[in-house]
Amino acid sequence: MRKLISGLIFSVVVLACGKTGLNSHGPIENNGTAPGVVTNVKVANLPGAAILTYTLPKDGNLQYVLAEYRINDSTTRQAKASRYGDSIHVDGFSKAGAYEVKLYAVSKSEVKSAPVSVTVNPSTPPYRVIAASLQIHADFGGVNITFDNTGEDKIALVVITKDNNKEFSAIETFYTQLKNGSFSIRGYDTTSIVFGAYIKDRWDNYSDTVFATVTPLWEVPLDKIKFRKYVLPSDQPSAWGWEMEYLWDDKYEEPGFHTLQGNPPEPHRFTFDMGVVAKLSRFKLLQRKYDWLYSHGNPRTWTMWGTAATPDPSGSWNGWTKLTDCESIKPSGSPPGVVTDEDTQHALGTDGKGEEYLIPLSAPPVRYIRMEIHSNWSNTDFFHALEISFYGNPQ
């Protein structure tokens, strides 16, 4: 009896698998009749795209609507829309102009209707509009490229310069949706260099290349031996034997600087003197490491202020200029307590000196730094970090 039951189960499984195999990759039905065509087609043109609305044929055999069209001289694309809707979106056009789109009603047997041809006239696509705003500027140790992307479209910024063979080649590609893009490339000598930049969209359309000859600005690490704390009345005192001076002792292990919790309340502030007026380019801040990464008192959001003049001893904001707003980034986006290898690498930086933050080129030269901590990674009211390093051009 057991053999008979096993044999029956085996037969059922084989038949079921065989049936699935016969139909898993074929049309839903096997009917060679073509469906009727879509009618009453209307066009709404968009930047680099268009939306087509239509009336579906009254055909129970209809499965979907297919659009076929060229986005440039060599690339053909398709778009599909369900039989439950009455519109289809066509996009990826390389430039403004007239394009032919062929619409097909497709049956459940994958049989196409006769085509219905319609002309769309998309306006200038976003990547070309973005490319028109490209600006190339000299930056510390390299070049800075800015652009406007008001629609927050997915694009790639490609930066090129001449390689060892004196041929232009890509040195960096930034994938972004930033509304106001600003990207820097560093590591170059202070000699005249030709850089180029262009925008690529997700359909591999490329803009023209914008070129500029720039001389990178001189950049050096600021000498931490000259750093001194400069206490103002509203500043947060140190705690647990972690003094402010440990924040620039060129040691990248504990102890660092730790503030006293809740005295005074947030935002926590502390001030120090770099000992020299400098045009800053960037800084690196190293979190408390190991089990403390992205947790406890490690800063998450803060504002960096600066001034070249001796600060008002009363602690007022007279003379202070906002240099930049900062946010520590956890690349994985994982929940509290979960830190990936990618997160750790980002927090430590490639040189072990910490996460890097850029100072805008428009920022004035400063000597005194005032840090205003808005939040930490545990949403409590204290701050700690191991080391801070500044880079720029001492005046």
Image (cartoon, helix red, strand yellow):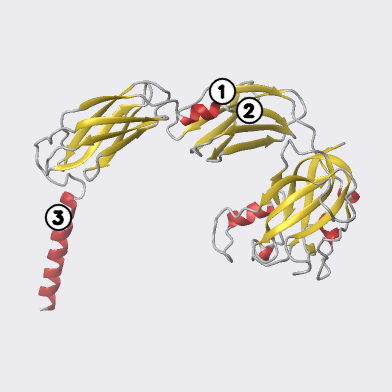
Relative to 326, does residue 279 appear above or below in the rendering? above
Q: Residue at x 81, y 71 (%)?
A: 240
Horizontal relation, residue 107 to residue 81: left or right: left
Mark 1, Cα crowd under 10 Å, few <14 / some 14-19 / many 20+, is some
Q: Which numbered disc, 3 or 1, marks the residue that appears first in the sequence?
A: 3
Question: Residue 88, located in which quarter of the rendered image?
Answer: top left
Q: Which numbered disc, 2 or 3, marks the residue that appears first in the sequence?
A: 3
Horizontal relation, residue 260 to residue 193: left or right: right
Q: How many numbered discs, if any? A: 3
**Which labelled disc corresponds to residue 135?**
2
Q: Residue at x 77, y 61 (%)?
A: 253
Could you say which is closer to the camera, residue 25 or residue 194?
194
Relative to 375, does residue 278 appear above or below in the rendering? above
Residue matched to label 1: 209
Percent position (x, y) of residue 67? 27, 32
Q: Residue furthest bottom?
A: 1
Relative to 331, does residue 379 appear above or below in the rendering? below
Residue matched to label 3: 19
Relative to 106, does residue 132 appear above or below in the rendering? above
Observer able to see residue 353: no
Q: Which numbered disc, 1 or 2, marks the residue that appears first in the sequence?
A: 2
Horizontal relation, residue 259 to residue 339: left or right: right
Percent position (x, y) of residue 303? 72, 51
In space, the residues marked 2 and 3 are separated at their CA atoms by 61 Å
In space, the residues marked 3 and 1 are separated at their CA atoms by 56 Å
Amino acid tagged 1: Thr
Amino acid tagged 2: Gln
Percent position (x, y) of residue 390? 79, 46
